Amino acid sequence: PPRSTALNHIPSKDSARHNSDEAKHPQGRINASFGLLGDTGNQMSVPSASPVDLAHLSRYTGGSRELNSDVLQLFLNQSTELMLQLQAVVEAADTRTWRHITHSLKGAARGIGAFGLADVAAEAEPLDPAAQHGQALKVLLTLRNRAETVQDFIRAYLDE
């Protein structure tokens, strides 16, 4: 079940800056790609299928687009690296590192509001790639697909 069907009203700390950013960065591209319904003043609605809950992230960033962008860029870099590492970890059947990486990915994804990715990482965390190699490969594919969806969303957000 989705964690949120719509983003809450997020008051901007600097309304003038928000309005200026809105004029420079219309929601069009991200709307078409990821279903954001639009930005009306300080409110944005999103369907439950959004890969990142921007309201969740904004609770930690005070709604600052610049800080959102910085945090999302960090996640993009980290998740890309973690996904590359997971492939090698499965092939090496390294259970300890598998659990460490999936735990890190789960926490980072929850931090930005990528709950779908976090849920898959949480399901993957207890697996033992040495004893459950086939299942670990299947979960890795699901993780990769979810991570790519989140990463594409972030790239679209950053390109606005």
Image (cartoon, rainbow, N blue to C red):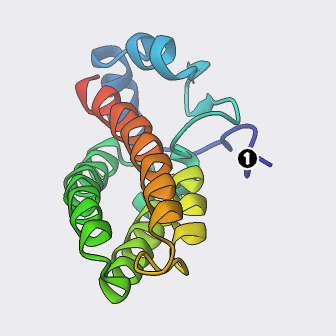
- Closer to the camera, 144 or 54? 144
Mark 1 packing: few (<14 Cα in 10 Å), some, or many (20+)? some
Residue 119 percent location from the top left of the image: 60, 61
Residue wearing tag 1: 4
Q: Judge whether 80 appears above or below 130 on screen.
A: above
- Quarter of the image that includes the C terminus: top left
Quadrant for residue 97, please give it: bottom left
Residue 67 percent location from the top left of the image: 29, 53
Report the residue that reaches farthest toward the bottom.
Answer: 96
Judging from the image, what secondary structure is the residue with disc 1 in?
A: loop
- Closer to the camera, 9 or 7? 7
Residue 93 percent location from the top left of the image: 32, 77
135 with respect to 145 (left or right) = right
151 with respect to 49 (left or right) = left
Number of numbered callouts drawn: 1
**Tag 1: amino acid:** Ser
Quadrant for residue 90, please give it: bottom left
The residue at the point 51 percent across, 44 percent down is: 52
Quadrant for residue 137, please give it: bottom left
136 with respect to 91 (left or right) = right
Q: In the rendered image, is residue 11 in sight? A: no
- Closer to the camera, 132 or 7? 132
Q: In the rendered image, is residue 47 in sight? A: yes
Report the residue that reaches farthest toward the right.
Answer: 1
Q: Judge whether 51 appears above or below 3 on screen.
A: above
Residue 151 percent location from the top left of the image: 34, 40
The residue at the point 50 percent across, 57 percent down is: 139
